[in-house]
Image (cartoon, rainbow, N blue to C red):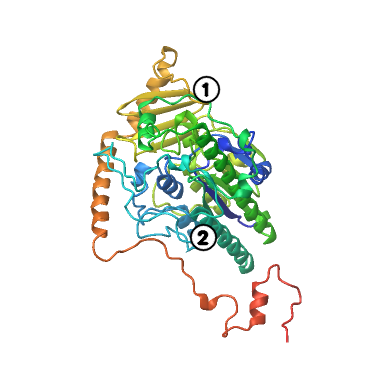
Amino acid sequence: MARPNIVVIMADQLAPQFTSTYGHPLVKTPHLDSLAARGTRFDSAYCNSPLCAPARFSFMAGRHITKIGAYDNAAEFSASTPTFAHYLRLLGYRTCLSGKMHFIGPDQLHGFEERLTTDVYPSDHAWTPDWRHPDERIDKWYHNMDSVREAGTAATTFQLDYDEEVAFAAKRRLFDFAKQGDTPFAMVVSLIHPHDPYVARPEYWDLYSHDEIDLPRSPDADDPHSMRVRAGIEADAVEVTDTDVRNARHAYYANTSYVDAKIGELVQTLEEARLLDETIVIFTADHGDMLGERGLWYKMTMLEHSLRVPLVMAGPGIEQGTVGEPCSLVDLLPTMLDLAADGGPWPVLGAELDGRSLLSVAAGGPEDPEAEAVGEYCAECATHPIYMIRRGRYKYISCDVDPPMLFDLEADPMELENLADLPAHADAAIAFAEEVSRRWDSEAIRADVMASQQARRAVHEAMLMGKRTDWDYQPRRDATEDYVRNHKDWTEAAVASRFPPMSGQRSRS
């Protein structure tokens, strides 16, 4: 068969634990369920940094954030960093982005031939944290508890406006691809939901009985980083009631169903465009959301609800089933290259990759008992780099200024018992600690993080002076070529825009 098209649908801040696909008893995600029923569901997929921009940059580059300096939500994603979009172009694919990717810096394409929308967040260095003053909150952009206390319904929000535009533009472009012929394409459709603010359209809110919305049952996490995050989001100082928490979770569930509806729309468009049978659909997210579990909200921790992501693949050659081995977003670049190369050679790589292809296991091959997922965090609410290694049933978390944490996720999926200091697990804890020392020069990384922060703050301060210069993406559109214009024969425009084409179509007199 011909090389497959690739469509990646990415949600924002969607923890797999809050989907019916991954077993939640209340949340309704029928379209994701359907995708998983005809494809492969990965049950131990992780982001590589639990924050929007770093997670997305590692996804794009197939490399960990400390390799590319993608430390936080204001770190520049260098134009010289090769991405899967660059490599797919070298393999003859058309590449397209519709939606959020949180690119920071003047390059707002990073290998995509076209971008259909602007981004939803700023592209400059404004959101740079400052590890010199870790206790200072930047109220303009730091998370706080307002999203929990103000949760509810609305007819429209900036996030709804954005995702409606993203989905519409993507669906229209899919029909364009269908009309244009046989060249394979790769499209990323990246939505902002169910990211907070937790505000939902009424029809999605009404999918759920409010009294049935479950409340978190796990005790508050008391490790040092969780306490820093609680302080950073003001959860230690601002009281929220059970009503607030239930409202926030209700809206999050509703917005997860909204994302699921967009999955359904996109799959339906692929079917109507006669592309579905030759397209690999991948659904994932940039990171998760604690959503009140362990007394935490949003992300920024290495705990499961923050760090894990959904990952479902379906399409030609993908087997129906589940995969338990750990994997992460950096694995998607080599997976896409395997799909696009179709057994042939990859293009010459511009940098060594940190991921591995998941195509073999998605096609029914054996799982790898040594498979791993690696996480790094170097952003707000931290003072030193934080590392995570997930291998087999164990997950290890390390930071120079915090006690290590070791969890047996098979026996303790809520991470309630830290095994790091227990004699029965001493060998595993020592082996992980030695591995962290080999893999990361933590002192050098911290120095680089702080130098990067200092440089970016200086650049941002200067850019506030005088004439403002914005890097935000301006979608290119020539309205003189849209629809029917005087330099076009309107009957030809009607024929050209119709899909499926009408056999024996005749022009109207």
Determine whether the residue tagged by mark 1 lies in a helix, strand or loop: loop
Q: Answer few, some or many: residues within 10 Å of disc 1's Cα (few below 14, many 20 plus, some between 14 and 19).
A: few
The amino acid type, in three-letter code, at marker 1 is: Asp
Is residue 329 visible in the rendered image? The answer is yes
**Relative vertical location of residue 420 with respect to residue 321 in this rendering, above or below:** above
- For this rendering, which residue is in front, 64 or 222? 222
Which mark, by number, is residue 393?
Answer: none
Image coordinates for residue 416, horizontal then vertical, percent: 48, 22
* Nearer mark to the viewer, of 1 and 2: 1
Image coordinates for residue 365, horizontal then vertical, percent: 61, 37
Residue at x-position 39% and y-position 61%: 472
* Gap in angstroms between the C-alphas marked 1 and 2: 41 Å
Residue 343 shown left or right of residue 350 in the figure: right
Looking at the rendered structure, the number of numbered marks drawn on it comes to: 2
The amino acid type, in three-letter code, at marker 2 is: Cys
Tell me the quarter of the picture where residue 233 sits: top left
Q: Answer few, some or many: residues within 10 Å of disc 2's Cα (few below 14, many 20 plus, some between 14 and 19).
A: many
Which mark, by number, is residue 412?
Answer: 1
- The numbered mark, 1 or 2, whose residue comes first in the sequence reads 2
Determine whether the residue tagged by mark 2 lies in a helix, strand or loop: strand
Is residue 45 visible in the rendered image? The answer is no
**Relative vertical location of residue 173 with respect to residue 8 in this rendering, above or below:** below
